[in-house]
Image (tube, rainbow, N blue to C red):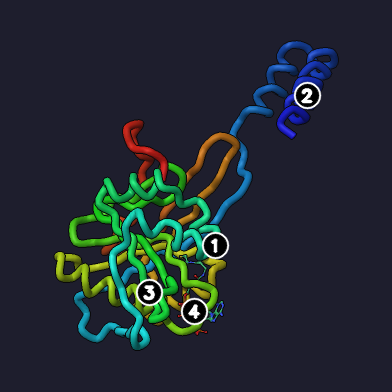
Amino acid sequence: MVVGAVVDAISRIARARRTRGPWGAARVALERVKPRPRFAADYVWFLLDLTQDTRPRPALPDGFELRAGTLGDLAAIQELDHELVSTMTKRLMRDRLARGATPWLVVAPDGRLACYTWSFEGSLPVHGDHRLTLPDGVVGFEDAVTSAAFRGRRIAPATWSAVGTRLVERGAYAIVGRVDVLNESSARACGAAGYVERARMRVVWRDWRILVQVALPPGDESHAWLRDVKRAGPRLRRC
Ligand SMILES: CC(C)(COP(=O)(O)OP(=O)(O)OC[C@H]1O[C@@H](n2cnc3c(N)ncnc32)[C@H](O)[C@@H]1OP(=O)(O)O)[C@@H](O)C(=O)NCCC(=O)NCCS
């Protein structure tokens, strides 16, 4: 496919040179390499205020246990069989752990992994090498997956709530996470946990770069830090 596109571009440029001269060829070449929108995805940033006493506190079913994960849990995590875990490797997991991120696992009484998510402090991977800088006390959640066998039982909201309670003990006051606007199940799970929409984000993939645009509700700058999505420096690896 790539070879075909290159051959097509060269023949168009050669034809333009024949019919429109060198400037015409230059214009066609520029047209081929200039960034063009290819694909855009829209996300909602949700925030859970952990200081609110009235927030919903969905509980895990009896016998289900929450614990922090380790590298040794990778095989069980991969068995969740979802695209969000298919890219999880030992290297990526080690990298995240080294940065202080925590994988959280909820295990059913029969030992099966029911739900899994990551919490990040300091900064949260957003797309490619783009990261959201998190203020102190705000923890970012990413990659939540409930095993297909356990969906629809409020396990994800209960997991976020239980992790939130642990994080409050470490000084956290809020959790943020982003959800694809097309992911209705996730948005409903967030609502059940008490998350509230705080911002919208559009990610645009162009020919050779990713653009991240965050929009806050007009007139409300209370979560202006959500705009702080930056490309990581060369020393930070892709997440
Ligand atoms: C999104 C997800 C984590 C929710 O987990 P959960 O533990 O099932 O959460 P809930 O029980 O609160 O269900 C949330 C919604 O999922 C939908 N749902 C219910 N049963 C379902 C099932 N068997 N399969 C798929 N979706 C189901 C319902 O719309 C439900 O909302 P409702 O009960 O108010 O109608 C889970 O569906 C999942 O792992 N999805 C794939 C990965 C993903 O999208 N992760 C989110 C990344 S932000």
Of callouts 3 and 2, the N-terminal one: 2
Distance in Å between CA atoms under marks 1 and 3? 17 Å
Which three-letter amino acid code belongs to the residue tagged 1?
His
Residue 135, image x, y percentages:
22, 55
Relative image position of residue 217 (x, y in whole percent): 38, 65
Compute the Cα span from label 4 to label 2: 50 Å
Image check: 86 left or right of 34? left
How much space separates mark 1 and mark 2, taking CA atoms? 37 Å
Q: List x then y, in percent, for residue 25.
A: 74, 17
Query: Tag 2 or tag 4, which sits nearer the N-term?
Result: 2
**Under tag 1, what secondary structure?**
loop
- Name which residue type carries label 4: Phe
Give the residue pinned by disc 4: 150
**Does dot 4 land on a helix, a strand or a loop?**
helix
Q: Residue at x 34, y 88 (%)?
A: 62
Which residue has dot 1 on it?
82
Residue 107's mark? 3
Asked if marks 1 and 4 touch (Cβ < 8 Å), the reply is: no
Residue 118 sits above or below residue 67 on the image: above
The foreground one among 214 and 59 is 59
Which residue lies most toward the front here? 110
Earlier along the polypeptide chain: callout 1 or callout 4? 1
- Give the answer, above or below, for where 104 lies relative to 31: below
Say which residue appears at 52% left-offset and 55% top-offset. 86
Q: Which residue is mark 2?
A: 7
Quarter of the image for the N terminus: give it.
Answer: top right
Q: Nearer the viewer, mark 1 or mark 2?
A: 1
